[in-house]
Amino acid sequence: MIDLRSPNDMLDHYVERYDHLLPAPSAQLLQRMDYMRISSQLLTYIASQGI
C-alpha cells in the first residue's frame, strides 16, 4: 500500500517502478488534464492581478 503522504522522492520511486503497468491516458483524460492546467494558470493570473 502506498501512503500518499510520503515524501515526493518515495512516490517518484513507485511511479518509476510501476508506471509501465498503467494503460496510456485516454484522449478524454488528456483533455481534462489540459483544462485543469489552463484553469489553474488562469486562477493564478487573476489572483496576481488582484481582480
Image: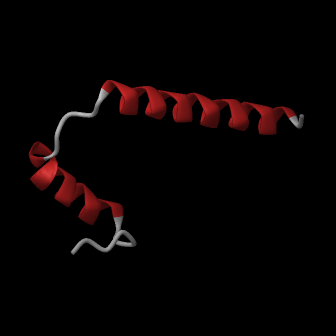
The structure residue drawn at horizontal position 25% and vertical position 65%, both measured from the top left corner, is 10
Q: Quadrant of residue 39?
A: top right
Residue 32 position, x and y percent, is 47, 32
The structure residue drawn at horizontal position 79% and vertical position 33%, both measured from the top left corner, is 46
Residue 11 position, x and y percent, is 27, 61
Q: In front: 47, or 37?
A: 37
The structure residue drawn at horizontal position 18% and vertical position 59%, both measured from the top left corner, is 14
Vertical position of residue 33 compared to residue 31: above or below: below
Give left or right: position of 29 versus 43. Answer: left
Q: How many marks?
A: 0
Colour scheme of the rendered structure: secondary structure
Residue at the right extreme, as displayed: 51
The structure residue drawn at horizontal position 29% and vertical position 30%, both measured from the top left corner, is 26
Q: Quadrant of the C terminus?
A: top right
Q: Quadrant of residue 4?
A: bottom left
Give left or right: position of 41 versus 2. Answer: right
Residue 49 position, x and y percent, is 84, 32
Vertical position of residue 44 compared to residue 35: above or below: below
Residue 42 position, x and y percent, is 69, 30
Give left or right: position of 3 versus 50. Answer: left
Q: Quadrant of the N terminus?
A: bottom left
Q: In front: 27, or 19?
A: 27
